[in-house]
Image (cartoon, grey):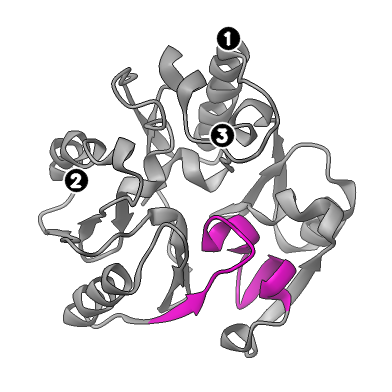
Amino acid sequence: MNLFTRAIVRTPGRSMVCGISAANLGTPDYEKALAQHREYIDALEGCGLQVQVLDADEGYPDSTFVEDVAVLTAHCAVITRPAALSRTGEIESIRPVLQQHFARIEQIMAPGTLDGGDVMQVGDHVYIGLSQRTNLSGAEQLIAILLRYGVAASIVPVTEFLHLKTGVTWVGGNRLLAAGEFITRPEFAHCNILPVDATDAAAANCIRINDSILMPFRFPQVRARLEPLAARIIEIDISEYAKLDGGLTCLSLRF
């Protein structure tokens, strides 16, 4: 298992209340979102990560979801090309940040679109969700990039969720925490699937960080499934980010 030592996050701006959303959960409370973001950073630091906190970018309401603008591997960083036009400019602000940490930087080009939320690494294989945010050109470009570095990747159709990792995440070994369509996806047939009930689907988006697992707040049944798998389970309230279709993985780049 690759050990994470660093993470990059971006402070939410007040403009986040204008972010993209299909959740119909109301408008985010900005002050509460700031407090939750601080708790998120504390959790990452509690897992031993050095966290680089980027300033808020008021020009881009969704920019706190920093995971979508890059894919980080042991070999290179890949700057993505988000499908949402309102997020296009975010990729240029992330470039100088990535240059601090990576000697090799690749990029997804038009007509490809790719969100980092559609990219999940399991062992030495990368799964790429074909979703409303990631198209076939973007997925195929990432596959070609990864192959140049000796990393295999494949495509997984996404129909029920915004992103691949909205409904399935890696939680250690060959185990995947999965909801909805991903419980029975043939692409994951060789994995050990931990199914999540439809009522707890929001808890399918967790983060495995070394010997810990970060999970959304107040999902006791999912927590019980995860407890045997990690030294620590850390619950985090991200209610204000859920209002913008966001999950735990969206809020950081980990490497």
Q: Position of residue 216 (x, y in %)?
A: 71, 41
Residue 248: percent from the left, percent from the top? Answer: 58, 43
Mark sitting earlier along the chain (1/3) = 1
Q: Do the residues labelled 1 and 3 touch (CB within 8 Å)?
A: no
- Which residue is at 33% across, 74% downward? 136
Taking the spot 55% from the left edge, 41% from the top edge, the residue there is 47
Q: Nearer the viewer, mark 2 or mark 3?
A: 3
Picture quadrant of residue 245: top right
Determine whether, in the image, residue 14 is placed left or right of residue 107: right
Q: Give the range drawn in magenta.
A: 154-183
**In which quadrant of the rendered view does residue 208 lie?**
bottom right
The crowding category of the residue bearing disc 1, from other C-alpha atoms within 10 Å (few below 14, some 14 to 19, many at least 20), is: few
The residue indicated by pointer 1 is: 31
Q: Nearer the viewer, mark 1 or mark 3?
A: 3
Residue 153, horizontal then vertical, whole percent: 37, 80
Residue that numbered label 2 is attached to? 101
**CA distance separating discs 2 and 3:** 29 Å
| Residue 244, label in figure | 3
Looking at the rendered structure, the kind of residue marked 2 is His
Q: Can residue 13 be seen in this view?
A: no
- Is residue 119 rendered to the left or right of residue 140? right
